[in-house]
Image (spheres, rainbow, N blue to C red):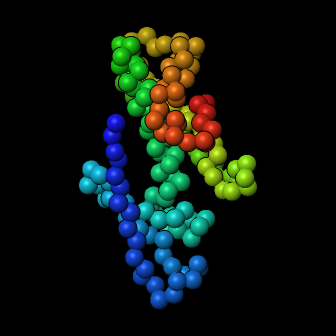
Amino acid sequence: MSEHRVAVSWRRQTDSFAYEDYQREHEWQLGSGQRISASAAPAYLGSGEQADPEEAFVAAVSACHMLSFLAICARRRLVVDGYEDQAVGFLRPNEQGRLAVTRVELAPRIEFSGTPPDASELERLHARAHKECFIANSVRTEIVIT
């Protein structure tokens, strides 16, 4: 139905290519033309000053859930004024003992115009958003809305 292209580029800038020595900084160029400076996570010798793939993954899960949620609300004529999420991804060994982002916890806080949906309806809206989220449908990671 659609394609989403990203170019990732890296060039060695150190004399040594030992694991401890080479730089992890690289660039992502999105299909929109936007360029994002990236690196490994600090735990894996990245700089900590740029986005890292694990953060980007958690952001993608959170953003996809939000966009699905907003679309559902718009179709139901529920007016959303604000949406904030403090998402957390957990890198842990998976069933095969390999490191993976095994869980992402979403903590969305939504402001509605008018009367907000009750807790039960809000839970149903989030469940539907999770079911419709392209990213959630693409991964094995447990995604929990708190």
Where residue 145 sits, quadrant-wise, is top right
- Residue 138 to residue 25: above or below: above
The quadrant holding residue 10 is bottom left
Q: Is residue 126 visible?
A: no
Q: Position of residue 60 (x, y in %)?
A: 46, 44
Horizontal side of 1 relative to 25 (left or right) equals left
Residue at image position (45%, 35%) is 134
Q: Nearest the camera: 58 or 130?
A: 130
Percent position of residue 97, x then y: 73, 55
User: Quadrant of the image for the C terminus?
Assistant: top right
Q: Position of residue 18 (x, y in %)?
A: 57, 83
Image quarter hosting the N terminus? top left
Q: Note whether residue 123 is visible.
A: yes
| Residue that sits furthest to the left in the current view | 33
- 144 or 94: nearer the viewer: 94
Residue drawn where x is 45% and y is 58% of the image: 51
Label count reads: 0
Q: Residue furthest front?
A: 1
Direction bottom: furthest residue: 15
Answer with left or right where residue 20 lies relative to residue 39: right
Work out whether residue 60 or residue 48 is closer to the camera in this orientation and state it.
60
Residue 41: x and y in percent read: 54, 62
The answer to whether residue 28 is left or right of residue 109 is: left
The residue depicted at 59 percent of the width and 46 percent of the height is: 89
